[in-house]
Amino acid sequence: MTETPRNRRADAQRNRERILAVAATVIEEQGTEASLRDVARRAEVGLGTLYRHFPTREALLEALLRQRFDRLAERAQALDGAAEPHEALVEWLRAFVAGAGAYRGLAASMMATINDEGSPLHASCHAMRQAGGRLLERAQATGDVRADVTGLDLFALASAVSWMLDQAPSLAARGDHLFGLVMDGLRPPPGG
C-alpha cells in the first residue's frame, strides 16, 4: 500500500514535517548539496527515517519546492480580490522572488522535474503559475501592467532576478532595486 498523508501514522507524519522544516533551514544555510546526515541529526531522527520519507536528495528537494509552490498558490488566491490589483501582484512577486532565492541552487537542480508533466512538482508549479497569472490579469485589467505581458514573461523575469541573486550573492544588496526595475518595465508606457 502506498503511504499517503491520510494513512500515515501520526508520529511518522510529525517526523516528515520536522524533516522538511529542518531541511528548509539547512538548505537555506548550505545550499542544495547540504549534508542529509546533518538534516537528520538536526531533525532528531535517524538517517534511516529520513530516507524512509525521502529516498533521495531529489525527493527531499522536490518536496520542499512543492511546499513552496503550494504556499505561493495559496498566497495568490488570498490576494486575489483582497488587495488592490497592482499591489497584490507586487506583493506576490516579492514572495516568489524571495522564495526562489531561499534555497541556493534549488532552482537549477529542479528545472527538469518541473517540466516533467507526470511529476507532482509539475502540478504544483502549474497551479502556482495559474494563481499568479490571475493576479497579472487583474493588474492588466486596471491598466497597471502592460497588456502584452504574459504569465510566461512574468515568471521568466521574476525567475531571472532570483537566479541572478542566487548566482551572484554580491548583488543581494541590489535585489530590491533590480526587482523595482522589473516592475517598472511591466508598467504601460506613458500615454500607452
Image (cartoon, rainbow, N blue to C red):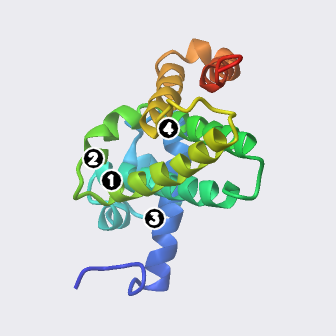
Pointer 1: what residue? 122
Q: Position of residue 152 (x, y in %)?
A: 42, 36
The mark lying in front, picked from 3 and 1, is 1
Q: CA distance from mark 4 to mark 1?
A: 18 Å
Secondary structure, mark 2, is helix
Mark positioned earlier in the residue sequence (2 or 1):
2
Real-space Cα separation, disc 3 to disc 1, in angstroms: 29 Å
User: Label 4, label 2: how many angstroms apart (C-alpha)?
Assistant: 16 Å
One can see residue 169 in this view: yes
The quadrant of the image that shows the C terminus is top right
Image quadrant where residue 127 sits: bottom left
Query: What amino acid is at disc 1?
Result: His
Amino acid identity at mark 2:
Thr
4 vs 1, front mark: 1
Identify residue for label 3: 45
Q: Marks 2/3: CA distance?
A: 27 Å
Name which of mark 3 and mark 4 comes first in the sequence: 3
The relative height of residue 99 versus residue 46 in the rendered view (above or below) is above
Task: Report helix, strand or loop for mark 4.
Answer: loop
Name the front one of labels 4 and 2.
2
In the image, which disc is placed on residue 113? 2
Residue 18 placement (x, y as % from top left) = 53, 64
Label 3 and label 4: CA atoms lie apart by 22 Å
Amino acid carrying label 4: it is Tyr
Image-quadrant location for residue 184: top right
Relative placement, left or right, of 49 versus 17 is left
Between discs 4 and 1, the one toward the N terminus: 4
Q: Mark 3 and mark 2 in contact (Cβ < 8 Å)?
A: no
Residue that extends furthest to the front in the rendered view of this protein: 191
